[in-house]
Amino acid sequence: DDLVDPDIYEGDEPPETIPDGMIWDYDTKRLVYKPPKSIPYGMNWSYSARNGRGMLVYLPPEKIPTGKIWKNSANNGKGALVNLPPLEIKKGYVWSRTAKKGMGGLIKIPPRPGTIPPGKVWSTTAFDGVGGVVNKPL
């Protein structure tokens, strides 16, 4: 009994066997995830998430703290509060949307080639993802 791959299956009619947790969407003519019977507090079912196959996503909070913004695509598409870039960026730094595990943050600009002392290397992941010069691995 071969399981149908929902990402590959195409047809005008549903496959003979529908994988657990999925249903046939007659409008889009494809397999989509079935919404859960109960949706956890603070979450919602998004039919458009996961390439239109649906998944549970977080609802944005009623109050968004200063310096943050809600981003639906953060947290593997489930949504999360992420950092906004500061109004002024310190000299030697640049804003990165992907820093701090995708939350956004300032990262150091690497030094010019030839200015790193012998026995040291530039690491983008050093100092909690800010970047810095570290000892060269032996």
Image (cartoon, rainbow, N blue to C red):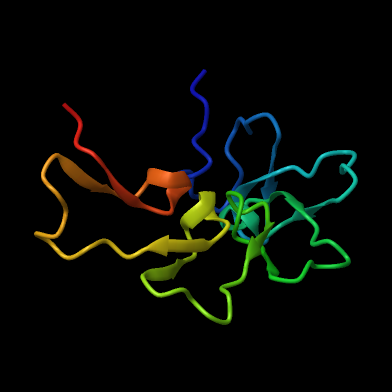
The residue at 32%/65% (across/down) is: 109
The residue at 58%/57% (across/down) is: 103
Identity of the residue furthest to the front in this view: 117
Query: Quick one: 112 or 60, which is closer to the camera?
Result: 112
Task: Report the side of 89 relative to 38 (left or right).
Answer: left
So how many labels did they put on this image?
Answer: 0
Task: Report the side of 42 relative to 69 (left or right).
Answer: right
Image position, residue 29 (x, y; %): 60, 55
The residue at 14%/49% (across/down) is: 117
Image position, residue 48 (x, y; %): 66, 60
Identity of the residue furthest to the top in this view: 1
Task: Report the side of 79 relative to 97 (left or right).
Answer: right
Query: Quick one: 54 or 133, which is closer to the camera?
Result: 133
Identity of the residue furthest to the bottom in this view: 87
Image position, residue 1 (x, y; %): 52, 18
The residue at 86%/67% (across/down) is: 63
Image position, residue 135 (x, y; %): 24, 37
Q: Is residue 80 above or below residue 56?
A: below
Query: Quick one: 116 or 23, which is closer to the camera?
Result: 116
Image quarter (top left, top right, bottom left or bottom right) of the C terminus: top left
The image quadrant of residue 86 is bottom right
Q: Is residue 130 above or below residue 89?
A: above
Q: Is residue 6 above or below residue 20?
A: below
